[in-house]
Amino acid sequence: MSDTDGKKTLGLRGGSGSVKQSFSHGRTKNVVVETKRKRVVVPKPGASKSSGSGNPALGDPSKRPAGISDAEMERRMKALAAAKAAEADEAQKRAEDEKAREEERERRRREIEEKAREEAEREAALKAKEEEEARAKKEAEEAKKREAEARKKPAAAPAPKADDPAAAQAALQKQQDRGGRAPAAAPRGREREDDNRNNRGKGGDNRRSGKLTVNQALTGGEGGRQRSMAAMKRKQERMRQKAMGGNDSREKVVRDVQVPETIVVSELANRMAERVADVVKSLMKMGMMVTQNQSIDADTAELIVEEFGHRIQRVSDADVEDVISQVVDAPETLQARPPVITIMGHVDHGKTSLLDAIRNANVTSGEAGGITQHIGAYQVKTESGAVLSFLDTPGHAAFTSMRSRGAQVTDIVVLVVAADDSVMPQTIEAINHAKAAEVPIIVAINKCDKPDADPMKVRTELLQYEVIVEEMSGDVQDVEVSAKTGKGLDQLLESIALQAEILELKANPDRAAEGAVIEAQLDVGRGPVATVLVQKGTLKRGDIFVVGEQWGKVRALVNDKGDRVEEAGPSVPVEVLGLNGTPEAGDVLNVVDTEAQAREIAEYREQAAKDKRAAAGAATTLDQLLAKAKADENVAELPILVKADVQGSAEAIVQAMEKIGNDEVRVRVLHYGVGAITESDIGLAEASGAPVIGFNVRANAPARNSANQKGVEIRYYSVIYDLVDDVKAAASGLLSAEIRENFIGYAEIREVFKVSGVGKVAGCLVTEGVARRSAGVRLLRDDVVIHEGTLKTLKRFKDEVKEVLSGQECGMAFENYDDIRPGDVIEIFEREEVERNLD
């Protein structure tokens, strides 16, 4: 079949050509291809004119997108040109930066290579030098060995010449025939052989240079130590500093060194930033052989500090308290604060009941025996909106120190006097406390609702103690009140508010808090708890504080209603939780910045108190101790151990115990504390033979078991009256009984008889009273006692009788006494023991 059968040949317009293609097996094929001519674009006749009249950059308006004006097109073209220019600048800048980085990398690489080359050259030089020294040493040793061998050999025949090989061979053969050894090679030949061996051993033979052994892989190189990267960096740093002139000696830093009364040598060196060895060396030059752990005094430390060129600052241990700022607040920072009012007066005059009436509460029922035995702190808000802080103090005589503390922290004292009882001893004491604290007094005459109330008598008796009320033309306010009926309470609050306005009480709440501990106790569930009256600043939860010999961090603040608060401002009483121990009532609370400062201050105060007690004991001489022991020889002691619920009660009990006793007996408090009775208390009581007294506390289970086993008596009290009375009764039992003599009769000696086996017997007439056989007798001669003793016999006629009545005759004989005469008078008496009591 032909290729052109019934078909038109496919052709191409324009020029065409034919190309012959070759295939395998000799096959070929002709292919027609088109030859394209180059297109030539001829501009239209009006195109040049239109393009010359407009902006050439804008192009043909007919080819623009629809809706694009000339101005918009021009703006787009400018933006495009600016973008291209910015891109070109950025590319140029990148190229320059890359070039600069490349140059810096090249420079650093050259520096590193140069340093590495220098280091390699230096190491190679050192290695070559070491090899040369080792080779020289080895050659010297071999030479010495050869010389020694040569000296040992006997003199031999002269060796043949080197240039006569036949003679040398004959000599060698002759020596072998004798059974000897071949002589050593010539020295020059041996040296050459050794050099070749050394060269092979030291790298002369490089046959194994390209092989890696396990030793090389593990240790690096031939097993030698390589320089670490850190060593190389240190070396480079030294070289850089040397190049920059950094090896110059630094200027000495002069420091202010604080030196206490005694300081450890190492601590002194640390504060001066000097080496301990240098400080010890300086001390040894001064003749003091000390180590770094020994202490030196401040004078020696001053010499050392000055020798090293520093400045000394002498400080004392008491300087730790300087962190407690005692700054005076500026007047513009002061703000008005509530007044602190203390209720004082005699026991059972109605102080707590009056405060209950003001607070609309009932505290008296919660106190044992109906009397206050703790300081209570409360806040009251009056109807007018004024806030008042009240302190309720005990009135019993044993709580003198509590009343004193209440007067020291108060602004106003309300003196409660019962209208039916008038002025009493604790009333007078409260007046004295208020005058000592220089605080104003408001007299509240209570129990005016009673029929026998006499307020005028109270006002009159107060004149004796320089308390002149307004009705007596004085300046002390007085109010007649009744806690039971509520009479005069509003007038009392108005008087307090008026007095507070006169005082103009102000404090700065925006400073570190400062307050006074009113009461402290050890609570079973909460630990040590202190009732604090904030005086300055604001006490917040989380504050770190120091109080007396204790410190802590405020874990919680509890107000008088039992609610937890976040902060307490001036004149606000709160319970503070978070102490590390129970403080003393009356201690001052100060807030500090850090726990370290608080701990340091507390430790310093504790040590100072311990030193003070030790000094007080050490001041007693041996003569004084002996004199005291001799004076106390006839004094009986009642030892007791006291545990109370709060610190104030414990102090009051101890003070009351000190007042019990006289020249013959006294009460000694072995130990007193706050909290429950523990096993250690029982152990101390057993060793001393003392009872344990618990005031509003109980013994825990181990303590009870221990007391039962050891036979220690534990007595519980909740009213201080009962406690004092029982201890007084126990102390009275230690008093020796009083001996009283009762005269029962007189007898006159009429005649003296001598009876064999008995001695002298007085024939007597009982002139008065009665004569008893068991009674004591005194013999009076001319009204002078010449003998006192007992009767050996009393007879009526021949019978031994127990007594002889007045007017009857009898015979008497004295025990171990015979000097009796007629006319002597016999005084007959009986002794009676009478128990004594402590007043």
Image (cartoon, rainbow, N blue to C red):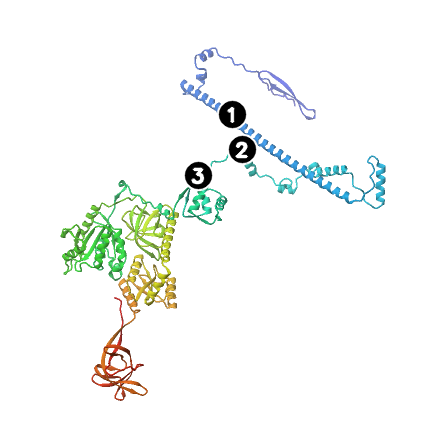
| Labels 2 and 1 touching (C-beta < 8 A) | no
Q: Amino acid at mark 1?
A: Glu
Comes first in the chain, label 2 or label 1:
1
Q: Nearer the viewer, residue 465 or 37?
A: 465
In the depicted structure, whether residue 437 falls above or below residue 231 = below
Q: Position of residue 386 (x, y in %)?
A: 22, 47
| Labels 2 and 3 touching (C-beta < 8 A) | no
Q: Nearer the viewer, residue 193 or 828?
A: 828
Q: Which mark is residue 254?
A: 3
Q: Position of residue 315 (x, y in %)?
A: 39, 45
| Helix, strand or loop under label 2 | helix
Q: Amino acid at mark 2?
A: Lys
Position of residue 714 in the picture relative to residue 830 (left or right): right
The residue at the point 71 percent across, 41 percent down is 141
* Mark 3 crowdedness (10 Å alpha carbons): few <14, some 14-19, many ≥20: few
Position of residue 790 in the picture relative to residue 687 (left or right): left
* Mark 1 crowdedness (10 Å alpha carbons): few <14, some 14-19, many ≥20: few
Write down the residue under mark 1: 96
| Helix, strand or loop under label 1 | helix
Q: Is residue 59 visible?
A: no
Q: CA distance from mark 2 to mark 3?
A: 26 Å
Position of residue 150 in the picture relative to residue 337 (left or right): right
Q: Which mark is residue 521?
A: none
Write down the residue under mark 2: 242
Q: CA distance from mark 2 to mark 1?
A: 33 Å
Q: Nearer the viewer, residue 839 or 426?
A: 839
In the rendered image, the quadrant that contains the N terminus is top right
Q: Nearer the viewer, mark 2 or mark 3?
A: 3
Q: Amino acid at mark 3?
A: Val
Comes first in the chain, label 2 or label 3:
2
| Helix, strand or loop under label 3 | loop
